[in-house]
Image: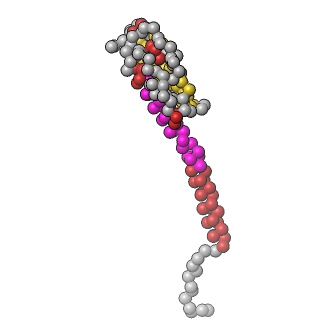
Amino acid sequence: MSISPRRRVRGMTLIELVLAIVVIGVGLAGVLVAFNQAVFGSADPMIRKQMLSIAEEMMEEITLKPFAAGAAVPPAGCARSTHDDVADYNGYASVGICDIDGTAIPSLATYNVAVTVTATAMPNGIAAADAFQIVVTVTHGTETLTLVGYRTRWA
C-alpha cells in the first residue's frame, strides 16, 4: 500500500475533446443557418420601406390638390405638373419614378407607380359627387404595395 497522496487528474480525455468539438460544431452550424437567413432577407425591409415612401409621397401630392372634379387632363408621360386637381391623377402610371416636373430619379428606376381615382360614396353619408377614393399602387419586381386614401370636397 502506498502512503503517498494520490495526484489529482487534470485535463481532458480524447473522447471528451472529440465530443466537445462535435457539440460546438453543431451549435455553430445552427447559428450560421440563422445568420444566413437573416442576411438573405435583409434588403426586403428596405425595398418595402422605399415602396411605402413612394406611395405616401404620391398620396400626399394628390390629396393636397383641390377637389375640383372638372375635366381631367390626360397624363403626359411621367410629368404631373399639368395636374391641377385630384381627378387629373386618375389613370396616371409611370415606369420608374419621376418628380412632379417629369425628371426621372435614376435610383428609383426599378419602381413603378399607378394611380386610380374614383368617385365613391362614403359610409357617413357623403355623396359620391363629394368624395374620391384614391388608390396608389407601387410595384418593384414581384412585390406590390397598395395605399388607399380618400379626399372629400372640403376645400
Q: Residue at x 50, y 39 (%)?
A: 46
The stretch in magenta equals 36-59
x then y, percent, for residue 98: 49, 28
Quarter placement of the C terminus:
top left
Q: Is residue 69 above or below residue 110?
A: above
Tell me where residue 57 appears, x and y as whole percent.
43, 28
Residue 25 appears in which quarter of the rendering?
bottom right
* Residue extending furthest toward the left: 155
> Which residue is depicted at the point 59% across and 49% down?
36
Write the residue at 56% across / 33% down: 110
Q: Quadrant of the N terminus?
A: bottom right
The overriding secondary structure of the stretch rendered in magenta is: helix
Where residue 11 sits: x, y (%)?
Answer: 58, 77
Look at the image and tell me whether residue 117 can be seen.
no
In this orientation, which residue lies closer to the viewer: 3 or 100? 100
Tell me: residue 58, above or below residue 67. below
**Residue name at image x 50 percent, y 30 percent:** 104
In the rendered view, tell whether residue 131 sits above or below residue 98.
above
Q: Position of residue 140 (x, y in %)?
A: 56, 31
